[in-house]
């Protein structure tokens, strides 16, 4: 069995999976794990393989030590990189700027180009590079492939991609809409085309990736024409801890009147806002319990969340002109039937009718939740970014 090692390297953690690129989307990976608390006194590595869970607790000095320990643990249970037919390593890279519109075989030159993009993603790209450097040193004879979160949106029309600020300033500093979650939006939209039995080129879709981080996209004939996230993942929908779209003047106001520094405002908008900033929680299961109990803060947070989501859905319906499918994915999108129902409530005049009984069904399989007479089909499609990355990696490495 040819396998791909998929790595998602964060600032203090590394998520990893051994994936069969030819598996079904709902199949479990061959192995999966998490290296966490890198750089802290007490680190932890968790590995799942063949239905068993293995845990190693030890100090993890850096990403190199973490991945080395993870590989040793994998070898101990018979699924190490040298124990399997490993054909490629796929790396999730958050920001590809305008340089990368598709996955790339990683070379020293590609790493340098990703490093040049650090100013656009100072919290993510350095960690991604750490993971790439460590994995390449530990597995020097295996092809490594970078898959970019922003790649799918690279070719959006200028009217959607550019901001109305001084053009030269924007060019000089890379200010534009890049979009994120691109691997998920592309995977889900292609899956829907298959489910409809039509080429992606013949379908107009709205895809809704709703998790702790959330984004939506308008996809016309297989190509994105707009997306909610912008130069950073802060823009767009209300999220778990992120504010989503706000008046930019709020930043200046908080700096001038509250004396908040840029870093403090950054933390406020990214980590202390969104649903959590209003309700105190960002888990939608907790939020639902609180609304059921009549908690007014929870109701307010939920209503703001739904209001913003419906605004984007409506604007994308106009942008597309004709909508064939609306698709929900990611943690909230796949599991919160009440979010799906409220997001598309009272849209019968636009041919969007959710079947309440279908909508309540929980499954790890793609499922249609609209009525048979709904002009626009509404789907729930579980996303699988790791599988998408594995398939790209295998394809490029072949």
Image (spheres, rainbow, N blue to C red):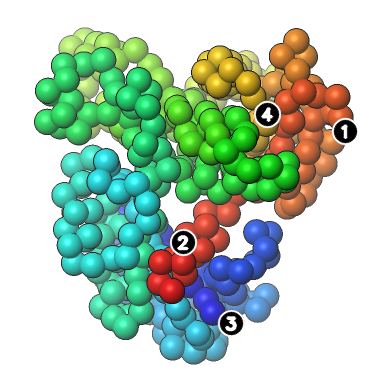
SS at badge 1: helix
**Residue 110 appearing in the image:** yes
Question: Earlier along the polypeptide chain: callout 1 or callout 3?
Answer: 3
* Mark 3 vs 4: CB contact within 8 A: no
Q: Marks 4 and 1, Cα distance to the nearest angstrom?
A: 21 Å
Residue matched to label 4:
324
SS at badge 3: loop
Q: Marks 3 and 4, Cα distance to the nearest angstrom?
A: 38 Å
Q: Is residue 331 above or below residue 218?
A: below
Question: Mark 1 against mark 3, which lies toward the viewer?
Answer: 3
Give x and y (percent) for residue 192: 66, 43
Residue matched to label 3:
1
Q: Marks 1 and 2, Cα distance to the nearest angstrom?
A: 37 Å
Question: Earlier along the polypeptide chain: callout 3 or callout 4?
Answer: 3
Question: Mark 1 against mark 2, which lies toward the viewer?
Answer: 2
Left or right of 218? Residue 51 is: right
Question: Mark 3 against mark 4, which lies toward the viewer?
Answer: 4
SS at badge 4: loop
Q: Quadrant of residue 291?
A: top right
Question: Earlier along the polypeptide chain: callout 4 or callout 1?
Answer: 4
Residue in the picture at 49% in, 25% down: 238
Question: Mark 4 against mark 1, which lies toward the viewer?
Answer: 4
Badge 1: how crowded within 10 Å, few (<14), some, or many (20+)?
few
Residue matched to label 1:
357
Q: Marks 1 and 3, Cα distance to the nearest angstrom?
A: 40 Å
Q: Quadrant of residue 349?
A: top right
Q: Marks 2 and 4, Cα distance to the nearest angstrom?
A: 27 Å
Question: Earlier along the polypeptide chain: callout 2 or callout 4?
Answer: 4
Q: Is residue 292 above or below residue 185?
A: above
Residue matched to label 2:
392
Which one is nearer the viewer's eye here, 220 or 179? Answer: 220
Give x and y (percent) for residue 259: 19, 17
């Amino acid at each position: 069995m040819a396998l791909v090692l998929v790595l998602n390297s964060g600032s203090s953690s590394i998520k990893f999976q051994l994936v069969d690129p030819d598996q079904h989307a709902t199949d479990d990976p061959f192995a999966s794990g998490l290296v966490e608390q890198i750089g802290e006194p007490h680190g932890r590595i968790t590995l799942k393989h063949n239905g068993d869970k293995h845990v190693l607790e030890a100090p993890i000095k850096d990403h190199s030590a973490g991945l080395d320990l993870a590989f040793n643990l994998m070898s101990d249970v018979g699924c190490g990189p040298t124990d399997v037919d490993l054909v490629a390593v796929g790396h999730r890279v958050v920001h590809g700027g305008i340089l990368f519109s598709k996955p790339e075989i990683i070379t020293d030159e590609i790493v340098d180009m990703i490093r040049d993009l650090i100013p656009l993603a100072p919290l993510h790209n350095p960690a991604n590079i750490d993971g790439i450097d460590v994995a390449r040193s530990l597995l020097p004879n295996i092809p490594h492939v970078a898959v970019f979160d922003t790649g799918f949106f690279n070719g959006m029309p200028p009217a959607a991609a550019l901001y109305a600020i001084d053009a030269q300033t924007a060019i000089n500093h890379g200010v534009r809409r890049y979009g994120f979650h691109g691997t998920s939006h592309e995977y889900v939209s292609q899956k829907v085309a298959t489910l409809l039995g039509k080429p992606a080129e013949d379908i107009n879709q709205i895809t809704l990736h709703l998790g702790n981080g959330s984004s939506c996209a308008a996809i016309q004939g297989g190509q994105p024409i707009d997306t909610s996230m912008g130069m950073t993942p802060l823009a767009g929908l209300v999220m778990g801890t992120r504010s989503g779209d706000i008046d930019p003047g709020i930043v200046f106001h908080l700096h001038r009147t509250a004396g908040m520094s840029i870093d403090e405002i950054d933390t406020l908008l990214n980590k202390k806002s969104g649903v959590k900033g209003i309700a105190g929680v960002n888990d939608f299961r907790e939020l639902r319990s609180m609304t059921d109990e009549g908690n007014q803060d929870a109701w307010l947070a939920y209503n703001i969340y739904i209001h913003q989501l419906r605004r984007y859905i409506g604007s994308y319906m106009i942008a597309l002109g004709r909508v064939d499918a609306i698709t929900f994915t990611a943690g909230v999108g796949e599991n919160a039937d009440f979010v799906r129902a409220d997001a598309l409530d009272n849209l019968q005049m636009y041919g969007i009718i959710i079947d309440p009984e279908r909508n309540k069904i929980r499954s790890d399989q793609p499922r249609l939740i609209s009525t048979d007479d709904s002009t626009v089909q509404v789907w729930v499609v579980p996303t699988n970014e790791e599988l998408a990355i594995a398939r790209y990696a295998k394809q490029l490495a072949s």
